[in-house]
Amino acid sequence: MLLFFALGLFVHLVFFVSIFDIYFTSPLVHGMTPRVTPLPPPAKRLVLFVADGLRADAFYGLDENGSSRAPFLRNVIMHEGSWGISHTRVPTESRPGHVALIAGFYEDVSAVAKGWKENPVEFDSLFNESKYTWSWGSPDILPMFAKGASGDHVYTHTYDAEREDFGAQDATKLDTWVFDNVKDFFHAARNNQSLFSKVNEEKIIFFLHLLGIDTNGHAYRPSSREYKNNIKKVDNGVKEIVSLFRNFYGNDEKTAFIFTSDHGMTDWGSHGAGHPSETLTPLVAWGAGIKDAQQVSAQYFDDAFLKEWGLENWKRQDVNQADIAPLMASLIGVPFPLNSVGILPVDYLNCTDLFKAESMFTNAVQILEQFKVKMTQKKEVTLPFLFTPFKLLTDSKQLDILRKARSFIKEGKFDEAVSLCKELIQLALEGLSYYHTYDRLFLGISVVAGFIGWILYVSLLIIKSQSNLTRGLKVKKPSRLLPYGFLAAGISVALFLLIQACPWTYYVYCLLPVPIWYAVLREFQVFQHLAASSLSLPLGRLLGHLLVFILGIEVLVLSFFYRHMLTAGLIAFAGWPFLTQLWSQAKVTSLSWTLFSLLLAMFPLMPVVGRTPDISLVMGAGLLVLLLSLFAIPSLVKRKDNFVKEELWVHILQILSTMLSMYVVYSTHGSLLRKQGLPFTNQILSWTMLASSLVVPLLSSPVLFQRLLSILLSLMSTYLLLSTGYEALFPLVLSCLMFVWIHMEQETLQQSGVSCKQKVTNMQFSYSMDITQFRQLCLDDIRRALFLVFFLVTAFFGTGNIASINSFDLASVYCFLTVFSPFMMGALMMWKILIPFVLVMCAFEAVQLTTQLSSKSLFLIVLIISDIMALHFFFLVKDYGSWLDIGTSISHYVIVMCMTIFLVFLNGLAQVLTTKKLHVCGKPKSHLV
């Protein structure tokens, strides 16, 4: 069994990692030559303001009095600059947003492994190409651009990470710190000759990263007074800095200013996905080289923002976020970042038509260089007769377009030259995508072949070892040609990959199906026998079971896209007892099952967690937990035969822990509202309860329902600390349904004629059955496995959608910490997601015990169901359409694969929580595990 688990874990890790090689490889190439516009730039220096987390509507919109929250920048839009919306891409996080702004390309997902802080792949940036860059702001953003820079010309000034506190009294101090330090810097420059000469050089950049708005948005939400007031403070700070620059440089009109944001924020204070509130950010540009405000009579956009914002008469020019990098590069005359895929928005430039055309030509050549390098790299590692070039951009077409564009510039046909360069850029970008995804089909076929082979192999194991189908079957030895054939196929694949100099991971993906399919085909007679046995069953019954199985899996798959499908499934579950003899056999149990199924069905219909926080609901959930635990005391005391005082004290300790959790939640919420931060005592109590939640249940009685109740009480204490609203009720309702499920399964077993050795109320998790007490699989066990997978998916999506990062609110972790820490906060939110998962797995342990079925049998069926779902999502992965669709489709596959891998670990955790017994004092009793 251990060998099979190890093999299964390896296979699923391979399938899981494959998605990163197929869809998440870095788009970067190296070896290009820097390209710069061969004309004098309009600006000597650039000032970049990035207001982290600023939504376009919050910035451009008017307040209840009809006044702008940013009067200075509003004045810039109306009188001296250009403006528009910068469209960001998923994931809408600070790191990829800043990379798009400053380096001009969209960050690959490998950066998330380092918390968006360091460079997994070194890249060129605008700062690297500058003469000098000075930056002020967050320690999470600034260092990554200094680390990747060549030479020592990028200077960073950051505050301590502890200042990024979501519970801080005044988060605007983060922005005030930046503005004050910039003022101090220029004051020092007046008295330092070396620094003075540097700041008077050309091609220099000043970067001000303003984190206060993002911090206030997370802490109080974008509709709050704190968020809106922070916008006013930023606007005032920008005004002061602009005045400072003009005074310092004697109004030489050689400074270009860019004001934008890395991403927006949802109404409930989160970001990461593709909602318009996250992807629409402001862009205001003014100063040297920037076109002045243009009044127009009419504008045509798909949205109604212009009228809402009162800006319908001022020309709006939208850009993609990566387009800002080439705009800034052209303004100060530095080479375009080598990895940039941004297209220069020439309509923002107030320069000669020649400068615009030359800049656009440089932009086209710079992106074309990336295309050439990518094509050369792919051509070198592909056999000549297998290489298929990108037909829309051949070498001759490249030369023809470049020659025509250069000819147009010489003839003064600048508009035609710009148009032709844009066409070349679009073709080059399509070609980059083509070569970046060149191996996708080949790898996809290999992984799918491995997937199908693995599903058949697990099915084979079930049929042979867990059923009566192969009893009496004489399996003939396979032909000798079979192993030699597969050996030859493996060698051929390895040689093919070797000749093409493929990465070592390709060998794993392509060679893994070989031994799997060999193991399947050598037992092909078993499948033939299964087909013959199936045909002997009544056709209606066979088709009915098959239809229910397929329908169940499809509902599970659809629930990833539409949470309300879980509601439909749970309503169907509620009617299950009435379609069988269970209703007449156990009315109270059946009614309880129906009641809790319908109660649980309400949760997927509610908005995702974080949108409507309500501490009173958390308090209500805590009171229900206390009530449940108090009702359980009499039943505990009655068990005098095996009840120990120690276990009563454990129960009382858990009641006190629940009360303490309620106090910490209430106290912390009040403290944060008063802007007094997270009380240190509350923080210590929260971490202590979290640490003890996995230990305290091991002190309780191993009697089935007593142990399950103890696990629920311990985990609920932690869950309350991680809750902000109605989701605090979710594990409680889920656990009640799990308790009823255990009873229902024993009733079902008795109905099928299998005699139960013990009553559920007397069973112990430590009670061990020998192999003779395990029964063989039946069709009903497939239904049990399907129930488990459905409950696991419900545990994942019942209160949110983990395929979307913004479904969960950072406020969930404020009882533990408020200082920004992506890994720690992410780990806490992940544990919150997994707590219902653990509760379901513990109940599943009880179901296996009551139904007298080995854990291996049911686990193998669950493995097949989850793998069939994963195969669905593998085919549903998109590399076209909106970035939200692409990101969501990939995350669905990753979630199902993680669920399969986590199932192995959480199954072990559930076994430890249910079967192990610790003793504080005295001689420990021996329990069979």
Image: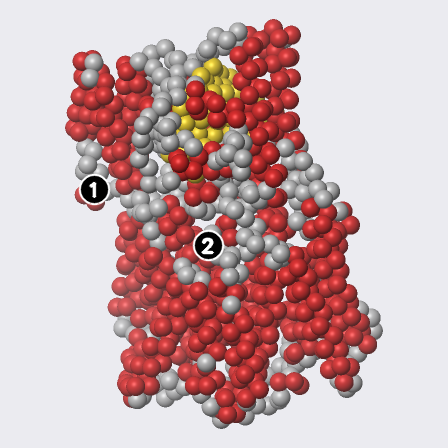
Residue at left 34%, top 15%? 351
Is residue 31 shown above or below 545? Answer: above
Q: Position of residue 568 (x, y in %)?
A: 43, 71
Depth order, front residue of 245/752: 245
Query: Label 2: which residue?
Result: 803
Q: Is residue 154 visible?
A: no
Amino acid type assigned to the residue bearing label 2 in the image: Ala
Amino acid type assigned to the residue bearing label 1 in the image: Thr
In this view, the mark in front (1 or 2)? 2
Residue at left 55%, top 23%? 238
Tell me the SS state at disc 1.
loop
Disc sitting over residue 361 in the figure: none
Depth order, front residue of 550/321: 321
Residue at left 62%, top 52%? 812
Is residue 619 shown above or below 630? Answer: above
Q: Going by the image, does 635 lie left or right of 231?
A: right
| Label 1 Cα neighbours within 10 Å, binned few <14 / some 14-19 / many ≥20 | few
Tell whether label 2 touches label 1 (CB within 8 Å): no
Q: Which comes sooner in the sequence, label 1 or label 2?
A: 1
Is residue 697 shown above or below 928? Answer: above
Disc sitting over residue 388 in the figure: 1
Query: CA–CA distance between discs 1 and 2?
Result: 35 Å
Depth order, front residue of 708/599: 599
| Label 2 Cα neighbours within 10 Å, binned few <14 / some 14-19 / many ≥20 | many
Q: Position of residue 132 (x, y in %)?
A: 51, 17
Q: Position of residue 279 (x, y in %)?
A: 43, 41
Tell me the SS state at disc 2.
loop
Depth order, front residue of 732/197: 732
Residue at left 35%, top 62%? 872
Q: Position of residue 861 (x, y in %)?
A: 44, 73
Q: Is residue 535 visible?
A: yes
